[in-house]
Structures are given as C-alpha cells and as structure tokens.
Image: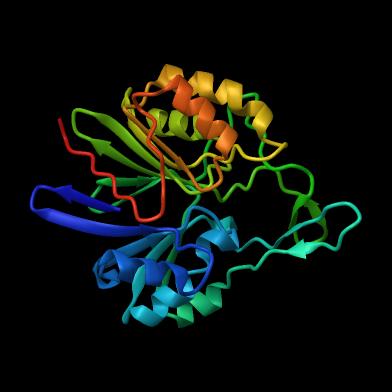
C-alpha cells in the first residue's frame, strides 16, 4: 500500500503471503521495487500471511520496521476428528530480529506514516454473529491446547481518504468484516466507508451461515468500493456482488486499486 500526502509518498507492506519467494516473485513480475518498502504490518500470525518474510529479508538490507500484535507468536494447530493434528508454522521473534526486522508489538491502535495510516490493533468483537474460528482451531496457552476462536492478533490497516471516507484493508478478517469496519469508524470518528479491501473469511460451512447478516450490514455501511479477496469464498462473493453491484469489484493477484481525495 502506498500513501501520498502532499509531496510525501510512503509504501507499506501488509502481509507477505505463504511462501518465501511467492511475494518477491510477484513483485518482480509487477515491476515493484521492494527496496521502496518502508515498513511491514502483519495482520496476524497465520503462516499464509507471514511466510514471505524470509524472502523479503533476503531481498532487502538494513533494518525494516515491522508492526505486529503481541499474540502474533502464538502456537496454533488444527485438530479435525479422526486425523492427526496439523501444527501451523509459528513465527520466531529471534529469527526476525536476526533477519533485520525491527519488531514493534502493540495491542492498542497506532499511527504510522506521520499519522496517515492507522493500525487498528486488537479489534472489538461486538456483533452477535461474527464468532470466529470453529473448535478445531486451537492455540497453546502455556499449559494446554485450547479452542482459539478469536485470533486476537487479527488487525487491519485504515486510511482516511479526504472527502471520501475510510479505506479499510484486511488480511483474513478473523475479527469479522463488520466488527473491523465499525471498529475503524469508532476509532477515527469518520462516518463513511470509502472502501473495504481484503479477506472477509466467509468461506466454508463454519462461516457461510453468517453471509446474510454480514451482507446486510455492509449494505448499510454502503462502501464506494468493495473488493473481497483471499478467504472470502465464492458464495460470499456472489451475495456481495448481487447486493452491492456498484461497489463490488472482482479481486485477483496483481490488481491495483487507486483511491484519490475528493
């Protein structure tokens, strides 16, 4: 994400993909110079959002600031009945320090880029239907494996586009798309949603039942642009495209979206 304010242009990298080289290869194909990246923000600690950090470290030299929630290091696994537990790769603070990342851990909202970009920090869970991950998703609490429904390290990026409203950028949206947007509106005091871009985590049998109330809430929020990606799922895509035909935009790898001030 690149933010322009007057003559200043700042580029942040929000998540890095699943593999060490996928993100860097995509950047090369798109003609993006990763040397221009001035900071990294992790949406949460799941490996499919942090796997590219090693490749980024190999491509760059020198310290690179990285903002993350303190629970981003949480050990997690998925336990489905009658199968072996699947242990998710876990981030290492020591390894990231050694690779040149300057990690800042924050639960609270924080501002980057001279106050232009808001990192939501921990997101309030207020809706009655966005209840998070099903029981197979577990986390180690230091003594035992327990159901981890909330993925509390989930956070989003927010930019106020002058005269248009908020741009909200999600990773997976584990906190819930509606919770995330409403949280951003409360934090900023802005009453308009210009765009919601990113994963809405509405795919699969555990999440498809909350598609109708999510769609209804997003219709009420009336974004100018809606770009569901990643884990949103095709059923949610169809429902959102039908409900918000003037706002919905199909997402794909390599797409660029530009929002300008009114």
Q: Position of residue 124 (x, y in %)?
A: 54, 34
In this rendering, does residue 179 appear at all? no
Give the farthest residue toward the left.
7
* Residue at the image position 41 percent from the left and 21 percent from the top: 221
Near-viewer residue (42 or 121): 42
Residue 207 figure quarter: top right
Which of these two is toward me, 93 or 41? Answer: 41
Could you tell me which residue is drawn at 34 percent across and 34 percent down?
195
Q: Position of residue 159 (x, y in %)?
A: 30, 41
Image vertical order of residue 81 relative to residue 65, above or below: above
Q: Is residue 25 above or below residue 150?
A: below
Height in image: 231 above or below 60? Answer: above
Residue 95 shown left or right of residue 66 in the figure: right
Q: How is the image coloured?
A: rainbow
Q: Position of residue 152 (x, y in %)?
A: 60, 47
Pick the front one: 213 or 233: 233
Q: What residue lies at 16% left-to-right and 35% top-to-bottom? A: 261
Choose top left, top right, bottom left or bottom right for residue 162: top left
**Viewer-side residue, 185 vs 219:** 219
Q: Is residue 45 shown above or below 162?
A: below
Residue depicted at x 59% and y 22%: 212
In what quadrant of the picture does the C terminus appear? top left
Residue 213: x %, y % from top left: 58, 21
């Amino acid at each position: 994400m690149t933010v322009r304010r007057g003559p200043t242009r700042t580029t942040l990298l929000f998540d890095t993909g699943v593999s060490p080289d996928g993100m860097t290869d995509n950047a090369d194909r798109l003609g993006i110079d990763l040397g221009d990246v001035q900071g990294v923000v992790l949406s949460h600690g799941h490996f499919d959002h942090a796997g590219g950090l090693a490749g980024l470290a190999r491509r760059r030299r020198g310290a690179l600031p990285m903002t993350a929630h303190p629970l981003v290091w949480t050990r997690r696994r998925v336990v489905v009945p009658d199968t072996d537990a699947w242990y998710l790769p876990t981030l290492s603070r020591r390894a990231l320090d050694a690779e040149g990342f300057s990690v800042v851990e924050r639960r609270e909202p924080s501002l980057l880029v001279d106050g232009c970009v808001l990192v939501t920090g921990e997101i309030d869970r207020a809706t009655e239907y966005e209840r998070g991950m099903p029981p197979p998703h577990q986390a180690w609490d230091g003594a035992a494996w327990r159901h981890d429904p909330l993925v509390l390290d989930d956070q989003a990026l927010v930019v106020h586009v002058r005269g248009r409203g908020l741009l909200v950028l999600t990773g997976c949206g584990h906190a819930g798309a509606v919770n995330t947007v409403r949280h951003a509106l409360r934090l900023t005091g802005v009453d308009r949603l210009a765009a919601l871009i990113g994963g809405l985590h509405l795919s699969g049998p555990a999440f498809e039942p909350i598609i109708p109330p999510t769609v209804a809430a997003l219709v009420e929020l009336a974004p100018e642009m809606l770009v569901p990606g990643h884990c949103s799922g095709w059923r949610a895509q169809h429902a959102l495209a039908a409900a918000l035909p003037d706002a919905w935009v199909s997402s794909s790898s390599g797409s660029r979206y530009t929002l300008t001030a009114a």
